[in-house]
Amino acid sequence: MTGILHYTTTTPGIGGVIKRRITDFAVREITPEGRVLENKVFGDFWPPGHEALEVPPQPEGKDQLILVMEKFNLDTNDALRRISRQLRTSGKRIGYAGLKDRRAITAQRISIWRPDVELLKKKPSLYVGLRDPQWSSERVEIGSLQGNEFEIVIREISMPAGELERVTVECFGQMKNGVANYFGEQRFGGNREVTHLVGRKFVKGDIEGAVMTYLTHPSIGEEEEVASARKNLADTGDFARALKEIPAKLRYERAILNHLVKLPKDFVGAFQSLPKHLRYLFTHAYQSYLFNLVINERIEQGIGIRAVEGDVLDEAGAPMGPLFGVDFPLAEGKAGEIERGVLEKEGVGLEKFRVKAFPELGCSGARKKIVLVPQGLRLISIEKDEFSEGKLKMRISFRLEKGNYATTILRELMKAAPSNS
C-alpha cells in the first residue's frame, strides 16, 4: 500500500519482531558537530532515574536554553506539549531538530526561549527527562542535526544462532554499498497507512474525499468500536452520530467532526481544526509515496539505485529521486521517462501540487537520495529471547543521515515489513 515492493540485498530474511519492549528501540540524535547523544534516563528498570535539573545562570544575550530531552513511549510533539504545560508557556517557544519514534527510548536536543527556570526544575513527566542544560543565542531548528544512531533488539528469531550471525554479517556487507532509500511505513501513518491516501485526494482537488478518507479509512488491528464507528460514518455520513461513537482519545478525528456537525459542507475549515504541523504531513506523504513508486520502477526496469543517463546527482555523484511539486524540474533521459511515467499512471500533473482548493497544503518540489548507505553497522549480540521460549534475540546498531528510516534497514535484514506486534 505504501509502494515499498523490492529488496536490494539478496540474503535470506531472519524474520523476528521489533519494539516488543519499549527499551528494545533506542534512538540517539547526532548533533551538527557529530556528537552522539546518550540514553541516560530510561532503561530496563522502572521508575527511571531522573536527576534534579541544575540550570546555570543565564548570560547576557543568550535567551535559548538548550537541553537534551529523553522520552519513553511518546511521540516528540506529545513530549513537547508536556513540557510547555509544565512551563505554562506556548509550545512555539520550544525548538527541536527532528521527530523521533514513539515506541522507543530517544534522546534529542531541544531549545526553550526564556523558560521559567523554577518551573523547569520541578519533577518532569514520568515519561520525559531533561538534562545537560546550557544557554545559547540560537534556537534548535528543524534539520539542525547530522542524523540518528539506532540500537535495536530484534526478538522472536527462529533461525539458529550460527546461521543468524552468518546471514546478518553477509547482509551488513551488502548494505555497505547502499540500499533502496524507501520512505518507511511511519511516513504513511504506521499501521493505519492513510496519510498518503488523504494527500492524494488533496492533490487531485477532492477536499471532501480527503477529509472523509482520514475519518473513515480502516486500520489493521484497530479496536472494534473505532472500526465500527468509521464504517458507520462511511455508510451514513452522519457526523453527529460519529461524534458520539468515536472515542475521546481520537482527538483529531473528533476536532474535525465537531466542526462538521456545525458546518457540514466546510471540509477545508474542518481540516484546519488539525494542528498546522499535522496538516502538512498529508500532501508530503503523497510526495513520499510517489518517490517510492519511482524507486520501484527503476528496479523493475533493471536500473535499480545506480546512476543512469539523465539522473540529477548530488555532490558525491549519487542519483536523487523526485519529491514532486509545483514548477519542479524533472530529470532528463531515462530517469526523466520514469518520473513522467509515474505521474501519468497516477493521473497527476505537477500543477496539481498547488492544491488550488486548499493552497496551504501546496507542495514545492525537492530531491532526495535514492541510495541509503548506513554507517557503523554492528552486530552487538545474539542471545536467547527471555520472553519467547526457543527463540533468539539479536541486538544491532547503525547510524543514518537525517531524514532516513531505520525500518528501511531492518526490512532488508528481516525481509519483511518490521513488525512490532
Image: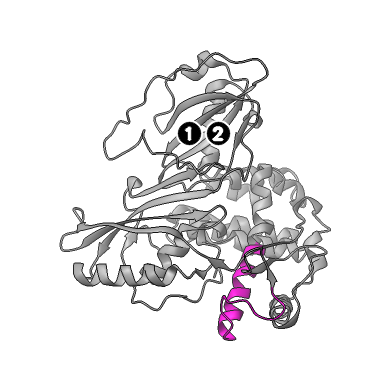
Q: CA distance from mark 1 to mark 2?
A: 6 Å
Q: Amino acid at mark 1?
A: Met
Give whichever of discs 1 and 2 has the lower sequence position.
1
Q: Residue furthest bottom?
A: 301
Circle 2 is placed at which residue position? 110
Between 192 and 50, the one lying in front of the other is: 50
Residue in view at x 79 percent, y 54 percent: 358
Q: Amino acid at mark 2?
A: Ile
The N terminus, quarter of image: bottom right
Q: Alpha-carbon neighbours of circle 2 within 10 Å: few (<14), some, or many (≥20)?
A: many
Residue in view at x 62 percent, y 76 percent: 307
The picture places residue 396, in percent across and down from the top left corner, at 33, 57
Location of residue 71 with respect to 170 vertically, above or below: above
Location of residue 415 with respect to 364 vertically, above or below: below
Circle 1 is placed at which residue position? 69
The secondary structure type at the circle numbered 2 is: strand
Q: Alpha-carbon neighbours of circle 1 within 10 Å: few (<14), some, or many (≥20)?
A: many
Q: Is residue 30 visible?
A: yes
The picture places residue 346, in percent across and down from the top left corner, at 70, 75
Which residues are drawn in magenta?
286-311
Residue in view at x 45 percent, y 27 percent: 131
Q: Toward which corner of the image does residue 41 lie, by quadrant?
A: top left
Location of residue 325 with respect to 23 vertically, above or below: below
Left or right relative to 420: residue 111: right
The picture places residue 351, in percent across and down from the top left corner, at 83, 66
